[in-house]
Image (cartoon, helix red, strand yellow):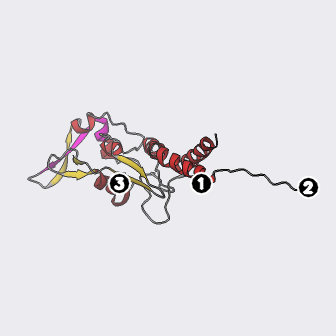
Amino acid sequence: MTIKIKKNFDLEKRLAAIQLGFIQAAPKVIRDAILVEIGSGRSPVDGGQWDRPYSASYLASIRGDIMFRFIKKLQMVVPLPGPDPVIFQFDKKPSPVNLKLSGQLLEALEVRTKLNSMIVTFKDTMRRKLGNEKKVISNSELADIHNRIGAGASGAIRRILPTVDGEDFNRTIQLKMDQLLRKVVRDSIK
């Protein structure tokens, strides 16, 4: 026995609703997931291990034992005894390595979605380099230093965005995107 059922499933409308729902919700979900990973001391990049802890000198700065200042006459950075007011004002913790000192860099993280793409960037506001009143650096420059060039005296690279071909976000962030897509699909069926 064969029967024919005539039903309009409105697939085009549903797909458009799914796409719109994802585009609207993704920026906050993905931004929050990236910030949770960084705040927990984990790289948001798949395989981007942050296995190098803070250097001994930076840990001493965090504890308040020592501070570093650029001496113009000597043209070099020198250690000085005592707490660093720049670091102390932010109540920096020695662990986990989470790229948070003033919070400016992480606050500048921005996720935008378009029809078939997502842009993850750092808003390019200019900021004073901590401890140096004359040096001005943008958030995207600072992110690039952490992500690709290497920060601090040790040159520690801490991957914060997948920028190399073939790289992707870590499994946790990919799962968040999958969960969001499933939620948007379920909501479109209701």
Tell which circle, 2 or 3, labels the residue nearer the N-terminal end. 2
Q: Nearer the viewer, residue 52 or 12?
A: 12
Q: Nearer the viewer, residue 158 or 36?
A: 36
| Tag 3 residue | 146
On residue 145, which mark appears? none
Marks 2, 3: nearer the viewer:
2
| Tag 1 residue | 12
Q: What crowding class fits label 2: few (fewer than 14 Cα within 10 Å), some (14-19), or many (20 or more)?
A: few
Q: Type of residue at label 2?
A: Met
Marks 1, 3: nearer the viewer:
1
Tell which circle, 2 or 1, labels the residue nearer the N-terminal end. 2
Separation of residues labelled 2 and 3 (CA atoms): 67 Å
Q: Type of residue at label 1?
A: Glu
Instruction: Give the residue displayed 46% in from the left and 58% down from the top.
Output: 117
Tell which circle, 1 or 3, labels the residue nearer the N-terminal end. 1
Query: What element does badge 2 sit on?
Result: loop
Which contiguous range is marked in magenta? 60-71
On residue 1, which mark appears? 2
Q: What crowding class fits label 1: few (fewer than 14 Cα within 10 Å), some (14-19), or many (20 or more)?
A: few
Residue 143's x, y, as percent?
A: 33, 53
Q: Type of residue at label 3?
A: His
Q: Is residue 165 above or below residue 36?
A: below
Instruction: Give the residue displayed 27% in from the left and 38% down from the top.
Output: 87
Instruction: Give the residue displayed 27% in from the left and 34% down from the top.
Output: 88
Left or right side of 87 for 177 = right
